[in-house]
Amino acid sequence: MKDIKYTVKNDIIFNFLFSHEDLLKDFLEAILKKSIKEVEIANQFSLNKIKYYEKIGVLDIKAKINEEALVNIEMQRDSQSYYTKRVLLYAGGLIRGELKAGDKYEDLKDVIMINILDFTIFNDIEDVHTIWKLKEINHLDKKALEGLEIHFVELDKFRNSKPDMYNKLNQWLALIDTENKKWMEVAMEENKKIKEAKEKVDDFMSEDDARRITELREKWRLDYASSISSATKKGKAEGIAIGEKKGIAIGKKDGIAIGKKDTKLDIAKKLLNKNLTIQEIIDITGLEEKEILKIKNNK
């Protein structure tokens, strides 16, 4: 058995893997704890989209299950303090985009957001997998509002746990995380879909185009993380200098903000040169439209 050269957490591999409806169905049944008759993937993965994948920062999977719910699955590897707000924004967009002119509200399908995170977001909760719904805070025993369900899976907690490897969700998480080879071996022995998934990844990574775009995606992520780190260090240094006049505590805070903002502006300029749309750049950098337009007009 060959080892996976790149972790399944890599966006390209992750999206390739779950473009197979039978594998996605098995994973969704594990995380949603329900039987699924039919899965229909809305945004099929294709290596013909290489140029598109080379220049975007976020990939996700959209699917319809049992003709009754829309599912959005995202793999997020880099920690973001605003991530929960971003999830809510995406959920709103998914719900809003579903209703077309002439449709009735009762025609709206439920929306399920599944977020697989390579970092810890809920420090005060031990559970690896949490499910969030809308409830009335003074009547938590009452049924949640229908229409929205948000799942968070924190791989950092999974790695530091003692998972039951006879549990189907843990089997899938062992494959996705790609960190513990023993867990993966047990998962493949217990679940033929996990073994099939591993074999598909091995075959995929044997293709030149697949390896190239996977490497590019990995490089993009590492370069972005490095630029943020460098900007933060620069910002701290500048902040301390400012702090001599304004107060060190204030200076550090302002410096970090300045550093990160400079990095985002640089990234936005590069993305404009690659002909990304304004909305794509907003999604990647978090900058406001007017800031990106200013850069565009001054090119």
Image (tube, rainbow, N blue to C red):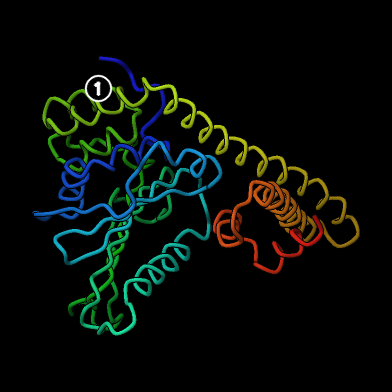
Residue density around tag 1, few if under 14, some if 14–19, many if 20 or more, within 10 Å: few
Q: Quadrant of the C terminus?
A: bottom right
Helix, strand or loop under label 1:
helix
Q: Which residue is at 89% across, 55% downward?
A: 244
Q: Nearer the viewer, residue 257 or 43?
A: 43
Q: Quadrant of the N terminus?
A: top left
Residue 19: x and y in percent read 28, 43
Q: Which residue is at 35% across, 43% downward?
A: 45
Q: Is residue 24 above or below residue 177?
A: below
Quadrant of the image occupied by residue 291: bottom right
Residue 151: x and y in percent read 30, 58
- Seen from this angle, which residue lies furthest front? 48
Residue 292: x and y in percent read 69, 61
Q: Nearer the viewer, residue 48 or 86?
A: 48
Q: Which residue is at 15% across, 50% downward?
A: 29
Q: Is residue 100 above or below residue 9?
A: below
The three-letter code of the residue at mark 1 reads Lys
- Residue 91 placement, left or right of 230: left
Residue 282: x and y in percent read 59, 60
- Residue 93 placement, left or right of 18: right
Count of numbered circles in the view: 1
Q: Is residue 102 above or below residue 111?
A: below
- Seen from this angle, which residue lies furthest top? 1
Q: Nearer the viewer, residue 206 or 47?
A: 47
Quadrant of the image occupied by residue 89: bottom left
What residue does disc 1 label?
Answer: 182
